[in-house]
Amino acid sequence: MNQIRFYRQNDPYGEFSNFSAHPVTLKGKVWPTSEHYFQAQKFAGTEHEEAVRNAKTPSMAAKLGRSRSLPLRADWESVKEDVMREALRAKFDQHPKLKTLLLSTEDAELIEHTRNDRYWADGGDGTGKNRLGILLMELRAQLTDSPTH
């Protein structure tokens, strides 16, 4: 199977990274990146949510989101994949060029390739869960089945 590996925003298919500079509008607000939205939802309904949304860079948003000095919502582990699906759907629906790029990958396996993450990425050696790549492939299949959605 054809594989497409992505990670850095400036590399080929870097637009698939949650750090890519594609603002999303969700919950009535504009989020600078899907990373900002995802990390902020760890603190939904608190003042920390807005602090993450206002972070100057996606790296800063991620750092805030990963900070365990802030109170993580109790249900986070059970909702994080749905939050990621919501962020990805908004990103690819709201940026038609990204949707076209995603659909152009056809049946290729999408892999977030970095040793920095064993859950959302492949862990760098292929043993990670690659959940971001899997959710992107899931979204691609949905968009292929209903291209007008």
Image (tube, grey):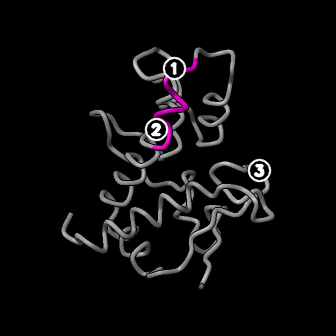
At a point 42% along the width and 42% down the height, the residue shown is 82
User: Residue 116: image x %, image y %?
Assistant: 77, 50
Query: Quick one: SS at disc 3?
Result: loop
Q: Is residue 94 left or right of residue 140?
A: left
**What residue would you read off at disc 1?**
73
Distance, label 1 to label 3, CA atoms, is 24 Å
Check the image and report above or below for 137 versus 71: below
Residue type, numbered disc 2? Tyr
The numbered mark, 3 or 2, whose residue comes first in the sequence reads: 2
Query: Quick one: SS at disc 2?
Result: helix
Q: Is residue 5 left or right of residue 53?
A: right
At a point 61% along the width and 76% down the height, the residue shown is 4
Disc 1 vs disc 3: Cβ atoms closer than 8 Å? Answer: no
Check the image and report above or below for 67 versus 61: above
**Quarter placement of the N terminus:** bottom right
**Quarter placement of the C terminus:** bottom left
**What residue would you read off at disc 2?**
37
Q: Which residues are magenta?
A: 72-81
Residue 77 vs residue 9, the one in the foreground: 77
